[in-house]
């Protein structure tokens, strides 16, 4: 079994306001730079759980592209099928955080991965096997996403990324084994402003959805599978939020790994939430966390479970 992640790698720039944000004015802030991209972050999270991870992306041959590539290799990601180009700049992501560390605004330039065509990676059709995990991020174009899901094998997982890109996944719903969205993305995807769990189940039962649909929210997650909606809510939130960026990437990597390994939904959610909590306590988008570290953090989570 191998993990293949197809998605973006970019330079992340975080600007956190030192005080309460004043719009339309210059704010004193602290800046940090790191390497990110949803696909890259998910791939690195997988590396800490499973060491055979292929990251498929497009690197620019510019200065930042070479640095990004070297960092991926340093982190243990395999780049045997990654592509390079002279025609695009490296992608970048800028996150504006409030003084509590919550994101107010994200800006991105992902043209280099959006221009990746299916024909560029069609050869992977004969390489990816049924028991491999295949993760896609919504930075890929709709045509590329549709072609990959229609032609590739594997346990297919997708991450919505953002409200502006989540609709790219609508055409591949029924071909996915697992999809992860946050609440805002799910409302956009379902074209329905659900108010609570009962309302959510109502629309899910009347919609075409993936085999397993995970919707994360501030307090936990909903999981819809086999016509059942399971609810998970943390009784106490992590108080020390340094940077919320990357928490969703940690969640989906951990959850997909656990579910593919045959673990129950309950234990999978528990460890995935632990991965998210460890991430938000760090200034980095990805932090080291093997299964023992995750299990230790999971013991700190008081989780209420239910079914609608």
Image: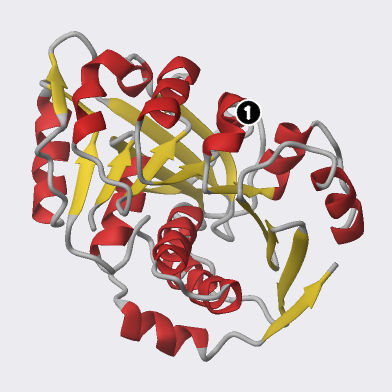
Residue located at (74% from left, 79% from top): 305
> Vertical placement of 77 versus 96: above or below?
below
Q: Is residue 166 left or right of residue 108?
A: right
| Residue where numbered disc 1 is placed | 170
Residue located at (23% from left, 13% from top): 88
Q: Is residue 49 left or right of residue 94?
A: left
> Vertical placement of 63 versus 10: above or below?
above
Q: Indicate the position of residue 253 as horizontal and vertical percent values.
A: 41, 58
Q: Indicate the position of residue 244 as horizontal and vertical percent values.
A: 52, 57
Q: Indicate the position of residue 275 as horizontal and vertical percent values.
A: 44, 70
Can residue 201 be seen in the rendering of this structure? yes
In this view, the residue in front, 169 or 97, is 169
In this view, the residue in front, 115 or 235, is 115
Can residue 162 be seen in the rendering of this structure? no
Position of the N terminus, as image quadrant, is bottom left
Mark 1 surroundings: few (<14), some (14-19) or many (≥20) residues within 10 A:
some
Residue located at (76% from left, 39% from top): 187
Quarter of the image for residue 171 reads top right
Could you tell me which secondary element the residue under label 1 belongs to?
helix
Quarter of the image for residue 70 reads top left
> Vertical placement of 185 versus 41: above or below?
above
């Amino acid at each position: 079994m191998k993990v293949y992640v197809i998605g973006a790698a970019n330079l992340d720039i975080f600007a956190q306001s030192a005080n309460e944000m004043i719009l339309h004015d210059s704010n004193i802030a602290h800046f940090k730079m790191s390497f990110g991209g949803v696909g890259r972050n998910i791939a690195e999270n997988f590396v800490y759980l499973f060491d055979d991870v292929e990251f498929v992306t497009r690197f620019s041959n510019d200065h930042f592209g070479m640095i990004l590539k070297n960092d991926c290799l340093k982190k243990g990601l395999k780049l045997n099928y990654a592509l390079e180009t002279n025609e695009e700049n490296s992608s970048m992501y800028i996150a504006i955080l409030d003084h509590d560390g919550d994101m107010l605004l994200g800006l991105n330039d992902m043209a280099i991965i959006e221009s990746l065509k299916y024909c560029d990676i069609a050869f992977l059709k004969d390489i990816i096997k049924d028991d491999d995990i295949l993760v896609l991020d919504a930075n890929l174009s709709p045509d590329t996403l549709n072609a990959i899901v229609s032609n590739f094998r594997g346990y297919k997982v997708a991450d919505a990324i953002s409200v502006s890109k989540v609709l790219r996944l609508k055409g591949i719903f029924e071909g996915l084994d697992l999809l992860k969205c946050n609440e805002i993305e799910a409302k956009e995807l379902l074209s329905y402003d659900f108010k609570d769990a009962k309302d959510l189940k109502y629309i899910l039962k009347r919609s075409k959805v993936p085999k397993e649909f995970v919707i994360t929210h501030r307090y936990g997650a909903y999981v819809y599978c086999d016509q059942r909606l399971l609810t998970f809510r943390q009784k106490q939130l992590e108080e020390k939020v340094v940077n919320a960026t990357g928490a969703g990437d940690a969640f989906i990597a951990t959850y997909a790994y656990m579910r593919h390994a045959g673990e129950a939904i309950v234990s999978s959610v528990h460890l995935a939430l632990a991965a998210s909590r460890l991430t938000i306590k760090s200034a980095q988008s990805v932090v080291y966390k093997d299964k023992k570290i995750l299990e230790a953090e999971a013991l700190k989570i008081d989780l209420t479970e239910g079914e609608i």
